[in-house]
Amino acid sequence: MASCAVLAFPGLAMAGPMPVLPELPPLPTHYQGSHDFYAGILTGYIGGSTAGLGAGLVVGNTFQASDLLLGIEAMGFADTRGEISIEASARVGVPLTDTIDVFGNAGLGYSFDTAAYVSIGASLEAEMGDGWIVRVDYRYNHYLSGDPETHKVLMGLLRGF
């Protein structure tokens, strides 16, 4: 006849039923920032070895993650010196008030005249209501080809969707 050993765990039989957990709120499916997708026009002054004026079309997306605003952006730009460029940037910002945000950005661009460049800068945005945003922008472009850097001071009107 075979013998069987039984192990006993003290207190296991005394545990009782599991408590009922409270209902948890649903996880967010969309992070709503001060604005999400946006598009607009930026115009302004370009300085460097030669000065000029320029204008660009910009599109991007911003979302809020805790106290930070995170975004990506693309811009096509042309200036009075004949230079045409495209640029893609990542943006990180903080809301200063309910309607004013400040951003830092960094990205890569390509000028059809001087080749690739690295761009860093800062933006100040004010929401005007009904999805309209006024932006003031500074960008420093360092050309990887060794060409003289440029500075852009831009202002524009964006529309958030």
Image (tube, grey):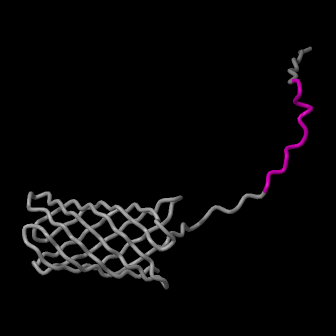
In which quarter of the view is residue 110 placed? bottom left
Q: Which of 14 and 161 is in front in this view?
A: 161
- Residue at left offset 24%, top offset 66%: 139
Q: Where is residue 129 in the image (x, y as percent from the top left)?
A: 48, 83
- Residue at left offset 16%, top offset 75%: 84
Q: Where is residue 2 in the image (x, y as percent from the top left)?
A: 89, 15
Magenta residues, as a range? 10-22
Q: In this view, does 143 lie to the left or right of 36?
A: left
Q: Position of residue 67 (x, y in %)?
A: 51, 59
> Does the magenta segment cover residue 76?
no
Q: Is residue 5 left or right of residue 107?
A: right
Q: Nearer the viewer, residue 101 or 77?
A: 101
Q: Quadrant of the image for the N terminus?
A: top right
Q: In this view, does 94 lie to the left or right of 140?
A: right
Q: Where is residue 107 in the image (x, y as percent from the top left)?
A: 28, 61
What is the magenta segment's predominant secondary structure?
A: loop
> Does the magenta segment cover residue 17?
yes
Query: Which residue, as the protein is rendered here, is positioned at the far front?
Result: 97
